[in-house]
Image (spheres, helix red, strand yellow):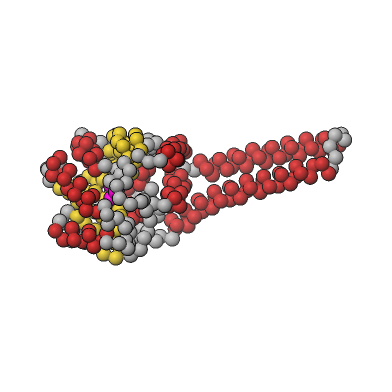
């Protein structure tokens, strides 16, 4: 019997845990009776009853496995640590506990996987969220798709079913800041997408704050693209060239008497502010790459676990 592993990160999701587990169990009972289920919950040190509820369910259901972290390590590291613990033949890399990515996709994903595709990814064709966030996300992922060297479909979501071969390839990528959404495509293999609607949350608010989303977004660009640094180089060359031309023109106009010294002071001040801003911008950009290198060479573990349940 083939086993399907499903990874679900969670943090203070006591209102959604039971519904998530029951929804997945129902889908396997009705649509995937010939497959084994390994549902791994990665808890990021919740402060509510999330872990307590998970332990109660896991005591009766061995297919529910739990990893509890010693503190909150962020959603990316937390999820990837759960992926590394998966033992299935096929692995759903991310299924949110709030079910915004619907588990109803899984049977069709398994069908395509059995048909020979090593990566089956969901495409968020529709989004049930406010217009501002919808446009911001679409804009970012289209930008990421254009900048990265990986062949990445712009609306591909985090919910992806990958073959065991893909997971083993991912394990060979030693990345301190894993960005799984692109990591799977970086490995290659045959892939296919499924359209679906990204649903609104049923319970509570998302724990993924704006600052976290900005950090994740920057991580995706820095990890899979060298375009920003090259762009900084080209813009720097362009501005330096323009400055030389401007200096030559001003010198020529001054020597011919068309420009006096004092009237040029505002131009100099504006130029100083402009070039100072450009330098700070590019220093910050280079700093992001240096920070990524710093995190990589420190060799810290992805997460520190407090306990594992049902893995034995």
Rendered view: 281 above or below 58: above
Judged by its main secondary structure, the magenta piece is loop
Residue 18: image x %, image y %?
A: 21, 53
* Farthest residue, direction right: 257
* Residue 184 showing in the rendered view: no
- Residue at 26%, 64% (x, y): give it: 307
State left or right for residue 210 relative to residue 194.
Answer: right
Answer with the quarter of the image where residue 117 lies. top left
> Was residue 263 drawn as part of the magenta stretch in this picture?
no
Locate residue 38 relative to residue 75 in the image: left or right. left
Between 165 and 78, which is closer to the camera in this rendering? 78
The residue segment tinted magenta is: 94-98
Residue drawn 68% across the image and 38% down it? 241
From where the camera sits, is residue 60 visible? yes
Exactly how many numbered labels are in the figure? 0
The location of residue 5, given as percent across then percent down, is 22, 49
Q: Residue at x 13, y 44 (%)?
A: 29
């Amino acid at each position: 019997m083939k086993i399907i592993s499903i990874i679900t990160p969670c943090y203070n999701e006591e209102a959604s845990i039971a519904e998530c587990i029951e929804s997945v169990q129902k889908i396997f009972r009705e649509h995937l009776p010939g497959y084994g289920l390994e549902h791994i919950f990665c808890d990021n040190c919740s402060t509510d009853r999330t872990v307590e509820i998970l332990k109660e369910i896991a005591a009766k259901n061995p297919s529910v496995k739990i990893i509890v972290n010693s503190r909150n390590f962020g959603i990316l590291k937390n999820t990837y640590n759960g992926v590394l613990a998966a033992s299935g033949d096929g692995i759903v890399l991310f299924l949110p506990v709030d079910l915004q990515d619907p588990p109803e996709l899984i049977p069709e994903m398994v069908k395509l996987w059995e048909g020979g595709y090593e990566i089956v990814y969901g495409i968020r064709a529709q989004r049930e969220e406010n217009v501002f966030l919808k446009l911001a996300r679409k804009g970012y992922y289209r930008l990421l798709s254009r900048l990265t060297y990986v062949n990445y479909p712009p609306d591909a979501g985090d919910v992806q079913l990958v073959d065991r071969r893909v997971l083993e390839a991912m394990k060979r990528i030693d990345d301190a800041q894993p960005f799984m959404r692109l990591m799977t495509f970086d490995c290659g293999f045959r892939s296919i997408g499924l359209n679906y609607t990204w649903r609104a949350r049923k319970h509570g608010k998302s724990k993924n704050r704006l600052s976290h989303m900005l950090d994740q977004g920057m991580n995706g660009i820095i990890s899979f693209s060298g375009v920003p640094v090259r762009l900084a180089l080209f813009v720097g060359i362009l501005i330096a060239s323009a400055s030389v031309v401007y200096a030559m023109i001003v010198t020529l106009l001054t020597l011919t008497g068309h420009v006096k010294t004092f009237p040029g002071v505002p131009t100099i001040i504006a130029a100083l502010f402009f070039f100072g801003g450009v330098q700070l911008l590019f220093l910050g950009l280079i700093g992001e790459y240096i920070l990524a290198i710093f995190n990589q060479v420190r060799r810290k573990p992805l997460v520190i676990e407090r306990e594992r349940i049902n893995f034995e």
